[in-house]
Image (cartoon, grey):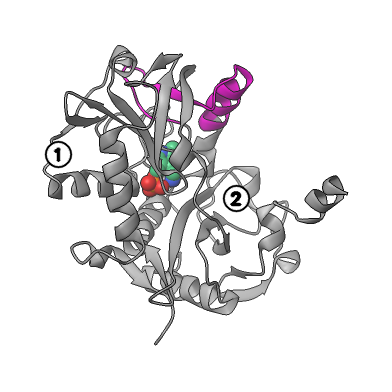
Amino acid sequence: MMNFLMKSISSNPKDKIKLVTINGNLMPLKDAKVSITAPGLSYAALVFEGIRAYWNKEHKQLYIFRLDEHLKRFINSMKLLKFIDYPNLSSIKADILQNIQANNYQEDIYIRLQGYIDEWGEMAVRSPVSTSIVSYPRPRAIAFTEGKNFTISSWQRLDDNASPPRIKASANYLNSRLASIQAKESGYDGGIMLGPNGKVSEGPGGCIFLIRNGNLITPSITSGILESITRDSIIEIADTLKIKVQTRDVDRTELYIADEIFYCGTGQEIMPILSVDKMLAGDGTPGKTTKVLQSEFTEIVRGNNQIFKSWISPTYKK
Ligand code: PMP
C-alpha cells in the first residue's frame, strides 16, 4: 500500500511542468518540439541559463534572482558561439515573465532558458536562433542543510582555449557529465576538477569556496570556471559582512586542510562540502561561516534584505 502511494506521488519534476515557451509562444510541454535536424541537437549549438525564483509568502510575490545578470550571460554565450539574429534581452525577459505569470506559481521555482540553432544546417551555421523557457517548482535541496562529500576528479576541467567554460553551452557539460558520473560511481556525491595547470577549477555544476584561517578563498574567473552569478553574489555579500575574500589559484591540498568548504550555484545555492577524498573539512559538519553566508543569502533571495534589493525582480504585478 505504502509502495503504491509512493509511486502515485511522482517526484519527477517533469510531471510538474505546465506551460512552456518557445519563441515567445506558450504551449503545453507535449506540443513543444524541436526537429532532429536542428544544429542545437546535432552539433550541441545550444546555450542556456538556470535561474531561480523565490516565493515570499508575506509579500505574496515571486522574486527572480539576478535576472539581468543571467540574461547578460545568456547573450554573451550566444555572442561567443557566434549566433546571429537572436532576440534581445528585453524580449527574452518579457517571455520569462509571461511564462511565470501564465503558470501562476506560488512556490520556489527553477527556470531553464535555452537558445539554440534551430531547423537544420551544418556545424558552423549561425541562425535561426530559437529560445525556449521551461519552469517548474523546485524547493531548496536537502544538501543545503546536510552537505555532501566530494572527491578530486581525474577528469581535467576544460580550458578557455579549447571549449571555453565561460560559455554556458550544453557542449561543455560533456566534461561535467564525465566528472559527475565518475564521482558517483566511486561512491562520492560529486567531483572537483583541476585545470590544465593542476590547480582547483570547479565542480560539474558549481563553483568552489574554501575557508582557511577566516579567509574566504575561491579560484579566480580565469581558472576555467563558469562566471557564476552565485559566486559573484557570495563575494559581494562577504564584503558587506567584512569577511576577507581571496580570488586566487587554489591547490588541491588546500582543500584537504580547509576549515570549511562549500559548493555554490543557482541549483545548489550554498551547499556545504563536508569532505574531499575522505579528508574532513573542519570537523566534517557544515561550518560557521558557511552558515552565516547561507542565512544572509536566504534573506536576500526572498526579498527581505534592503541592501541587495536590486538583485531581485518581482514577477507579479500588484
Ligand atoms: N559552474 C558550472 C559548471 C555550472 O554549471 C554552474 C551552474 N550554472 C555554476 C558554475 C554556477 O553558476 P551560477 O551561480 O551562475 O548558477
Which numbered disc covers residue 145?
none
Picture coordinates of residue 271 (x, y %)?
41, 38
Which residue lies under the disc numbered 2? 40
Crowding at label 1, few (<14), some or many (≥20) Cα neighbours within 10 Å?
Answer: some
Q: Which residues are magenta?
A: 175-203
Picture coordinates of residue 50 (x, y %)?
47, 53
Out of 12 and 89, give the one closest to the viewer. Answer: 12
Picture coordinates of residue 311 (x, y %)?
28, 63
Q: If the image is split into quadrants, where does the C terminus sit?
A: bottom left
Q: Is residue 182 magenta?
A: yes
Q: Nearer the viewer, mark 2 or mark 1?
A: 1
In primary-sequence order, the first of circles 2 and 1 is 2
Cα gap from disc 2 to disc 1, whole angstroms: 43 Å
**Which kind of residue does numbered mark 1 sit on?**
Ile
Q: Residue at x 22, y 43 (%)?
A: 235
Which numbered disc covers residue 243?
1
**Which kind of residue does numbered mark 2 sit on?**
Gly
